[in-house]
Image (spheres, coloured by chain):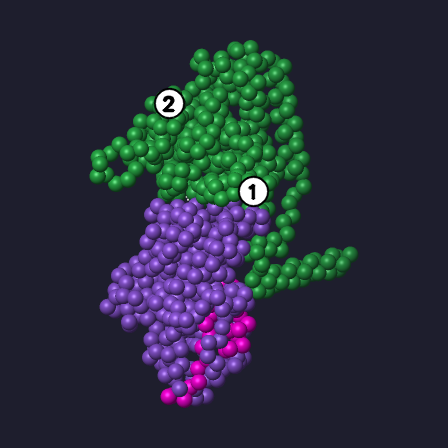
Amino acid sequence: MTVLDDSTAPGLVGPPNSHGPRRDPAPLLPDPEPVRILGTPAAKTFDAELQRDLYRRLVLGRRFNQQATTLTRQGRLAVYPASTGQEACQITAAMVLREPDWLFPSYRDTLAVVARGVRPLDALTLMRGHAHSGYDPYEHRIAPLSTPLATQAPHAVGLAHAARLRAAADPETAEDLVALALVGDGGTSEGDFHEALNFAGVLGAPVVFLVQNNGYAISVPLASQSAAPTLAHKAVGYGIAGRLVDGNDALAMHSVLSAAVEHARSGRGPVLVEAITYRLDAHTNADDATRYRSAAEVAAWRARDPLTLLEGHLRAAGLLDDAGVAAAAQAAEDLATEIRAQFDNPPDPDPDSLFAHVYAEPTSQLREQAAELAARLDADADAATAAEDEAR
Amino acid sequence: MSTTMVAALNAALRDSLREDASVHVLGEDVGTLGGVFRVTDGLAAEFGAQRCLDTPLAEAGILGTAVGMAMYGLRPVVEMQFDAFAYPAFEQVVSHVAKMRNRTAGRMGLPITIRVPYGGGVGGVEHHSDSSEAYYAHTPGLHVVTPATVADSYGLLRSAIASDDPVVFLEPKRLYWSAADFSPADVSTAVVAPIGRAMVRRPGTSATLLTYGPSLPVCLEAAQAARSEGWDLAVVDLRSLVPFDDETVCAAVRATGRAVVVHEAAGFAGVGAEIAARVTERCFHHLAAPVLRVTGYDIPYPPPMLEKHHLPSVDRILDAVARLQWEQ
Ligand SMILES: Cc1ncc(C[n+]2csc(CCOP(=O)(O)OP(=O)(O)O)c2C)c(N)n1
Ligand SMILES: [Mg+2]
């Protein structure tokens, strides 16, 4: 495994007349094979309590995905893009961040948002449909879930850059923060992704880009998406370190992401991590995945389920027994019960909220429109009351 | 003191940078060069390369980075080099800059100023003369302002930077080198807060010209020429397209009963169509004639040798005034 080190700092290696910084690409290159820890000697030295913690969190994450999918069947969520099979990525993305850090999730990353401490109901607000976003981005240091693919990546760069500027201007309030942007394999084709990498490289911003490569963008397989050797190689053209990791190996994910985050935090530049994983469920509850992938393929990946892999390893290592499994399962059931309770009362969004937050102060035009809607709703309510009286 | 619009804009940036440490200028060539129009001249030297940052050449990246900076509490002032080169940033503007406050139920506003040199009349080859205001004005969540005078270019830019909402600040490049007797030191705080207020530039009794940005001087010239026809034309400078000052506009139209909207952008589905509709809806019983428009034609911006036919001219404005049904 190529160790992240200082060698990503600029240095002139081109001909004397070449234009400005040139650097040796070797330290930026990802390893040919994804980093794995499960089943390797490195697993033995991995902190035992952290391993158990990862297991418990993955079990909760899986239950969260199942419960949210069930809520769509009950009509309580408009849509849910599950991250089933990607829990090792989702959970570790939240775990490796410290308090001052920021997370920039995409629409598939509700679980990472919950894993960072947001109440499930608030994380699922977008999918429920009563508001666009349910949590306070400043309280949790999580940007709203971003649906336009990869558009959140440059935000992560700007925020990380701003934190650096603030730290330089005012060391008293300096925050050594890292911004972590989550993107899918399809999202790496978007211009915003490339511009974000380029800006991050040029500004030296403390950003980590985590690409969850689950092999598909809705129905389009990676082969139709990119001819790059790996998606991690996309970093190299921007002078950024690229790292490749087995996204279903929770220990490897934790190890590679922590190293990337601390690399960025220490001022040694951004990192792009490509995690190879698989979405076991369809794209969303509205998708029919059998139209574009075979049952055999899904079965092969099911055998590499991050939860099964971790559980098997922990049991073999003597770090987990039936009682531990049962305790985790019980905690997961408690979470599911709690989520269902949060969804018990149907939402009643206030129509006035339509106009309240378009601007800091509503324009006179918006005030007129809000009054028009309010008057209409009052009239409707009066008519309903009158009709009830009549019926009585 | 004779001051150009470029110098007034430069002074507004300088004063904002000086007064508020959170203000940061970023864009293409804004640092060492001072911008292709020199609006940021000397700012990097005075405030350092980080406060006036030469970015990589990627407009979506610039806007996206500015969004992140604003999330962290900075006040980015972004320069788009030209009207038509702001289009790559459009997704960031529409999907994030305009919507973030709304998406977060008011928790996260983005105080970003997006400066865009716009409009024609400078002999630019294609992609250098677009009037892109309708795209922005049609996007809820943005303020859209455009100065037409040297004093307003200072005052409006100060207000834009101080605003807690994103402001698209359209600079009529044809007026960049116009000059007026103006000193930023004389500007009172009242003048520095005019977003959302139109200004009657010339009172009149016969008909009201409604215009903004690069077309204001043309309208004032038309009003002058109209005197020989016996018309006394009022001229309203909208200054702010969003929020729109219905009050000032309606009062000025009611006073004359006749109105012509003038702008450079193509007429179809343009800002003038919105203004004509609003005026008709609100002032119908005061109107002696339909509201007319004098605009650019519905064509891609023409090559420089033909642009004079496209731009609203004094003659076209006076022809429109003549069509305002003077004999009942
Ligand atoms: C800019 C943009 N284009 C298209 C879409 C529609 N869309 C939503 S998800 C998706 C596929 C995304 O694939 P990937 O980036 O691999 O993420 P995954 O769904 O696999 O997590 C598409 C095309 C979108 N949300 N944004
Ligand atoms: Mg994918």
Q: How many marks?
A: 2
Q: Position of residue B119 (x, y in %)?
A: 35, 64
Q: Position of residue A375 (x, y in %)?
A: 65, 63
Number of the label disc, if any, that sits on residue A137? 1
- Amino acid type, callout 1: Pro
Disc on the earlier residue, 2 or 1: 2
On whether residue A367 falls in the magenta region, the answer is: no
Magenta region: which residues?
B228-253
Quarter holding the N terminus of chain B is bottom left
On whether residue B247 falls in the magenta region, the answer is: yes
Gap in angstroms between the C-alphas marked 2 and 1: 35 Å
- One can see residue B261 in this view: yes
Question: Which type of secondary structure does the marked residue at label 2 adopt?
Answer: loop
Q: Which chain is purple?
A: B
Q: Position of residue A224 (x, y in %)?
A: 33, 35
- Residue B13 vs A247, above or below: the answer is below
- Amino acid type, callout 2: Thr
